[in-house]
Image (cartoon, rainbow, N blue to C red):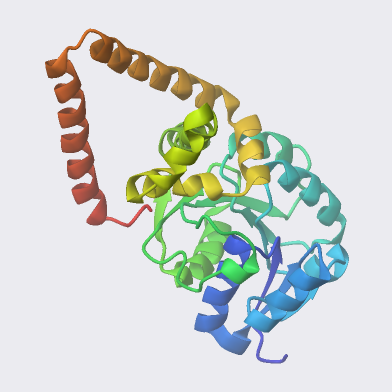
Amino acid sequence: MSDVRLRLAIIGVGLIGGSLGLALKQKLGDEIYITGLCRTQRSMDNAVALGAVDYASPDLKRVVEDADIIFLSTPVLQIVPMIEKLLPYVKRGAILTDAGSTKQFIWEHLKTILPEGVWYVAGHPMTGRELSGVTAAKADLFKGKAYVIVEDTGAPPEIVEKLMSVLRLTEAKFVTLDIAKHDRCASVISHVPHVTAAALVTLLNRSGGDLESCIKLIGGGFKDTTRIASSNADMWADICMTNGEAIAANLRELQQILGEVIDSIEHKDRQAVHDYFAASKQRRDSLLEAVEKKFDPN
């Protein structure tokens, strides 16, 4: 491995971690050596066979001890405990980064335990699929998608740039936000939509004697609106526990909006209902047009 110029450890070689590995292997080939931590033998075999990692193991020390960059892609509540376990084996100068959907919770814990010379640069690739596991990974999963980098975690500019020089190979579109704003915005555009999609499925399940008939009518609208409800339950439970204040506040705002619509419908106020749909369509269309000029957030 004399040609290796970068060593990357991926903790959690699933959809996101596996896609990162595939993307970097595609661009760097033998110049990068990727190790991966997996929970099961099947996951390890799949990760190596698919080319997402060069070496997979359940042995944390062997996975991280030589790594220049450690990428954590586990459910949010597992990130801090995992870092606590791996810190004794991390070399000085290593960079820790992650794919966690919430940032403040993680940083509040990490800033008290990181040893001198080990850096954390918070990240959040705004991409995914309703499928999970390394077999769902794609080398182009990050391409054209927003990827948030939070720079206010104490890492010096040269460390951030070292990480960015690698992450840019994914062809993501990078956005810089402060930690608090990231969590608030993620709640609006990602976390609350997932809760809402799950609520629509729950509504279907509670349709009682109409359930079988409703199922026969399922078409594109229901499938499109609820697609993200098929996402990993562990991941989303952790997100709700670690960004609860923002999510709860936005759900209450959504509750108020729905209450206004209910009131308009019950009072047969067609104009108010029409205006609700018209304003939403106009805003969504203009947003998508603007967003497409920057990146694809879906």
Q: Is residue 217 visible?
A: yes
Q: Is residue 195 left or right of residue 144?
A: right
Q: At which x and y percent is residue 48?
A: 71, 80
Asked if residue 245 is positioned above or below residue 189 in the image, the reply reads above
Give the residue displayed 55% in from the left and 51% down from the top. 123
Q: At which x and y percent is residue 78?
A: 74, 46
Q: Is residue 178 visible?
A: no
Q: At which x and y percent is residue 7?
A: 68, 75
Q: At which x and y percent is residue 269?
A: 17, 12
Asked if residue 65 is positioned above or below residue 6 in the image, the reply reads above
Asked if residue 4 is positioned above or below residue 190 in the image, the reply reads below
- Given residues 261 and 55, the one toward you in this image is 261
Give the residue displayed 62% in from the left and 88% down from the top. 30
Residue 21 occupies quadrant: bottom right
Give the residue displayed 53% in from the left and 28% down from the top. 208
Residue 118 occupies quadrant: bottom right
